[in-house]
Amino acid sequence: MYVDTVVIAGIGTVLLMLGFFVGVGIFVIRDSKRSEVVPGAASESSEKAIRKSRI
């Protein structure tokens, strides 16, 4: 198989993209396990900020 500079650059680009997406996936999985928030429920800090803004 003929290996040109363009082929090596293309393989490198694909590997970098895969590494990026794997890294983002790992970050999302770890972050979702860290903070399990009920959708639609306001946290205490956001409720306090809403009260202060109304005053």
Image: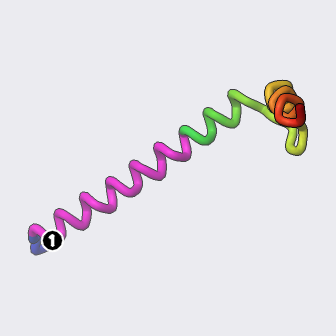
Range covered by the magenta-colored residues: 5-26
Give 18 or 50, whichever is nearer the viewer: 50
Q: Percent position (x, y) of residue 18?
A: 41, 55
Displayed quadrant of residue 54: top right
Q: Is residue 35 magenta?
A: no
Can you say which quadrant of the picture contains the C terminus?
Answer: top right
For the point 81% across and 35% down, the residue is 37
From the top left corner, tell me how far across and down residue 12 is, in percent: 24, 58
Secondary structure, magenta segment, majority class: helix
| Front residue (pair 3, 44) | 44
Residue name at image x 13 percent, y 73 percent: 1
Circle 1 is placed at which residue position?
6
Decide which of 9, 3 is in the foreground and name it: 9
Q: x, y (%) of residue 41? A: 90, 38
Q: Quadrant of residue 39?
A: top right
| Residue 53 sits above or below residue 25 on the image | above
Amino acid type at image mark 1: Val
